[in-house]
């Protein structure tokens, strides 16, 4: 049997899942969700995915093909979430740079997550 906190967290997760479906069309597929969250982690850590960083390393998933991930990255680019720019030093490499649209989306996503959880669970930042 679930206790109150677990139940409330599960309800919040379901609400967030619905919000993600409505607000993040590029992330509706499993590959899309994977790419979105990989981008989110990299953006939060680095502000961009640098040329020297192999995309296979950033986006690796044992169930998704490189082609599926590349196609989803193109979709994110077409949707205005990322830009592919030539590296300033070595033109053979490309950088994936988040657009303001992606940064705003990540901010709204995090804010919505927090507000959804805080409706029923008391949250305190640990850092």
Image: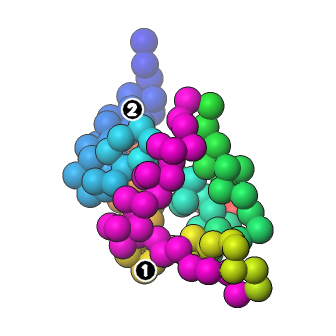
Question: Farthest top residue?
Answer: 1
Residue plotted at (66% across, 56% down)? 55
Residue 8: in sight, yes or no? no
Instruction: Determine which of the numbered discs, if any, sits on residue 116 in the image.
Output: none
Residue plotted at (51% across, 44% down)? 67
Residue plotted at (32% across, 45% down)? 28
Disc 2 crowd, CA 10 A, few/some/many (<14, 14-19, 20+) = some
The spot of residue 83 in percent (x, y) is 48, 75
Q: CA distance from mark 2 to mark 1?
A: 31 Å
The spot of residue 51 in percent (x, y) is 71, 71
Image vertical order of residue 22 relative to residue 10, above or below: below
Image vertical order of residue 51 relative to residue 29, above or below: below
Residue 86 is one of the magenta-drawn residues: yes
The one nearer the camera, 12 or 78, is 78
Look at discs 2 and 1 and give the one toward the viewer: 1
Answer with left or right where residue 104 lies relative to residue 40: left
Q: Which residue is mark 1?
A: 100
Q: How is the image coloured?
A: rainbow
Q: Which residue is mark 2?
A: 10
Image vertical order of residue 61 relative to residue 52, above or below: above
Magenta-colored span: 63-88
Residue 59: in sight, yes or no? yes
Provide the secondary structure element on which disc 1 rests: helix
Residue 75 is one of the magenta-drawn residues: yes
Residue plotted at (67% across, 50% down)? 56
Image quadrant holding the N terminus, namely top left
Image quadrant holding the C terminus, namely bottom right
Answer with left or right where residue 10 lies relative to residue 83: left
The one nearer the camera, 34 or 91, is 91
The spot of residue 96 in percent (x, y) is 57, 70
The spot of residue 118 in percent (x, y) is 39, 52
Provide the secondary structure element on which disc 2 rests: helix
């Amino acid at each position: 049997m679930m206790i109150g906190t677990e139940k409330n967290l599960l309800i919040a997760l379901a609400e967030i899942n619905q919000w993600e479906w409505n607000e993040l069309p590029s992330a509706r597929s499993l590959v899309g969700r994977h790419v979105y969250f990989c981008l989110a982690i990299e953006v939060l850590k680095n502000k961009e995915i640098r040329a020297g960083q192999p995309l296979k390393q950033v986006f690796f998933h044992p169930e998704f093909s490189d082609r599926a991930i590349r196609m989803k990255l193109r979709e994110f680019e077409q949707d205005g979430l990322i830009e592919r720019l030539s590296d300033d030093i070595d033109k053979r490499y490309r950088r994936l740079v988040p657009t303001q649209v992606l940064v705003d989306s990540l901010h709204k996503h995090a804010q919505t997550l927090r507000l959804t959880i805080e409706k029923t669970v008391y949250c305190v930042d640990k850092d």
